Image (cartoon, rainbow, N blue to C red):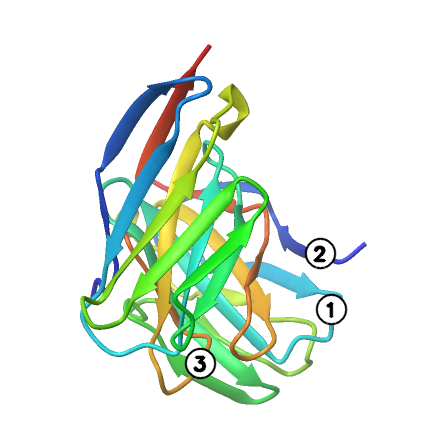
C-alpha cells in the first residue's frame, strides 16, 4: 500500500531536549516536504526536498533542520525545541507537479 | 506567506445541498490543488487543475480555475454528512513545482 508514515504520532517533550520526527514514503517520490499546522494559520511549509541531498527552506524554517540522505526518508529535527513549536506536523511526498501524499501527522507538545 | 485564501471560512448546509468554496491567490501558478482534512487527520488530495485548464470534474466535485481573476472554486454537489471536513486550496510556488502554499481553509459542516 502506497503511504507516508510518520513517527511518533504523539510526542510531549520539554524545552531544549532534541528530538527527531521521522518520515518515510514507499512511492519512490522525489519530492518531500514538512508542514506545520496551527489554528488560525493553516498549513505552513517548513522545509522541502527535491531529491536526495537537495533541500530548501519553506516559509517557517527557523528552529528546524532536515536531511535527505535516502530517497524514502526525510526526518525533521528540532535541535532545541521551544513551546512555540507546539504544533501538528505533517510530512508529504510527491512527484514533481503532482498531488502530494500526506502522512497521518505528529502532534508535538513542548512544555 | 499566504498565497491561497479560501472563502467562506465556514459553511453549514443540509445533506443534499450543494457546497461552493472559493479560493483566491496572488501570483502566477503552475497548478492549483484542493485537499480535504477530517478533524486533526492527514490531508487527502481531491483534485488538481493545471493553469491551462478551466474546469475539472471528479465524481461529485467540480473545480474551476480563472487565471485572469486568480481564483478557483470547488463545488461539491449533493453533499453528504461524510463531506463534513475542512477544505484547503494549495498553489505551488512556481519554481519548485511542488512547494505548496496552503490557504487557511473552509470548514464545511453538513447536517443530516
Secondary structure of residue under mark 1: loop
Query: Which residue is tagged 3?
Result: B97
Query: Which residue is tagged 1?
Result: A27
User: Marks 3 and 1, Cα distance to the nearest angstrom?
Assistant: 18 Å
Can you say whether B75 is above or below B95 in the image? above
- Residue B112: % across, % down: 46, 10
Q: Residue furthest right?
A: A1
Query: Which residue is tagged 2?
Result: A3
Q: Is residue A52 visible?
A: yes
- The reply to whether callout 3 and callout 1 are in contact (CB within 8 Å) is no
Horizontally, residue A64 falls left or right of residue A53, namely: left
- Residue B78: % across, % down: 48, 27
Q: Mark 1 or mark 2: which comes first in sequence?
A: 2
Residue drawn at x 30%, y 39% as measured from the top left: B106
Q: Chain of mark 2?
A: A
Secondary structure of residue under mark 3: loop
Amino acid at each position: 500500500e502506497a503511504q507516508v508514515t510518520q513517527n511518533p504520532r504523539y510526542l510531549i517533550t520539554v524545552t531544549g531536549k532534541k528530538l527527531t520526527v521521522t518520515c518515510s514514503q514507499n512511492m519512490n517520490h522525489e519530492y518531500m516536504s514538512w508542514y506545520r499546522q496551527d489554528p488560525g494559520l493553516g498549513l505552513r511549509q517548513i522545509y522541502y526536498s527535491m531529491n536526495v541531498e537537495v533541500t530548501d527552506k519553506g516559509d517557517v524554517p527557523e528552529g528546524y533542520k532536515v536531511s535527505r540522505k535516502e530517497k524514502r526518508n526525510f526526518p525533521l529535527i528540532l535541535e532545541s525545541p521551544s513551546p512555540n513549536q507546539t504544533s501538528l506536523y505533517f510530512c508529504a511526498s510527491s512527484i514533481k507537479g503532482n498531488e502530494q501524499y500526506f502522512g497521518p501527522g505528529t502532534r508535538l507538545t513542548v512544555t | 506567506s499566504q498565497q491561497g485564501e479560501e472563502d467562506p471560512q465556514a459553511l453549514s448546509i443540509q445533506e443534499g445541498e450543494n457546497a461552493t468554496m472559493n479560493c483566491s491567490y496572488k501570483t502566477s501558478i503552475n497548478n492549483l490543488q484542493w485537499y480535504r482534512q477530517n478533524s486533526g487527520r492527514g490531508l487527502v488530495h481531491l483534485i488538481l487543475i493545471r493553469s491551462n485548464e478551466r474546469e475539472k470534474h471528479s465524481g461529485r466535485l467540480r473545480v474551476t480555475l480563472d487565471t485572469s481573476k486568480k481564483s478557483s472554486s470547488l463545488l461539491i454537489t449533493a453533499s453528504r454528512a461524510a463531506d463534513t471536513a475542512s477544505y484547503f486550496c494549495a498553489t505551488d510556488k512556481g519554481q519548485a513545482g511542488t512547494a505548496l502554499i496552503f490557504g487557511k481553509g473552509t470548514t464545511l459542516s453538513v447536517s443530516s
